[in-house]
C-alpha cells in the first residue's frame, strides 16, 4: 500500500509540472524543494 501512495504522489507531481509547462524534475529534487519551503515557513 505504501508503494502505491508513493507512486501516486510521483504521478501527481509530474502532472502538475506538465500542466505548468515546467521542465520535469527528478522526484527527489521536488521533495527537497518542498521540504525547504516547509522548513522556511516554520521559521
Image (spheres, rainbow, N blue to C red):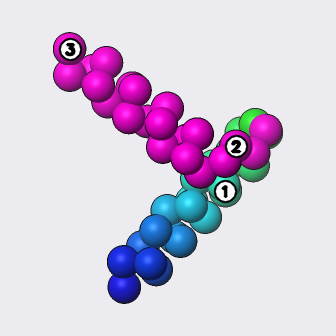
| Nearest to viewer (mark 3 / mark 1) | 3
Q: Residues within 10 Å of mark 1 (few under 14, many from 20)?
A: few
Which secondary structure is most common in the magenta stretch?
A: helix
Quarter where residue 25 is shown: top right
Position above or below: 18 against 23: below
Earlier in the chain: of badge 2 and badge 3, it is: 2
Q: Secondary structure at mark 1?
A: helix
Earlier in the chain: of badge 1 and badge 2, it is: 1
Q: Position of residue 36 (x, y in %)?
A: 40, 26
Viewer-closest of 12 and 35: 35
Residue at 20 percent across and 14 percent down: it is: 43
Residue at 36 percent across and 77 percent down: it is: 2
Q: Point out which mark residue 15 bears.
A: 1
Q: Position of residue 16 (x, y in %)?
A: 63, 49
Reply yes or no: does residue 25 show up in magenta: yes
Mark 3 sits on what residue? 43
Residues shaded magenta: 23-43
Mark 2 sits on what residue? 25
Contact, mark 2 vs mark 3 (Cβ under 8 Å): no
Left or right of residue 1, residue 32 in this image: right
Residue at 55 percent across and 41 percent down: it is: 30
**Please, which residue is most extreme toward the top here?**
43
Amino acid at each position: 500500500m505504501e508503494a502505491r501512495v508513493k507512486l501516486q504522489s510521483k504521478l501527481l507531481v509530474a502532472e502538475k509540472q506538465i500542466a505548468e509547462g515546467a521542465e520535469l524534475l527528478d522526484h527527489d529534487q521536488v521533495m527537497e524543494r518542498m521540504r525547504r519551503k516547509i522548513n522556511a515557513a516554520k521559521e
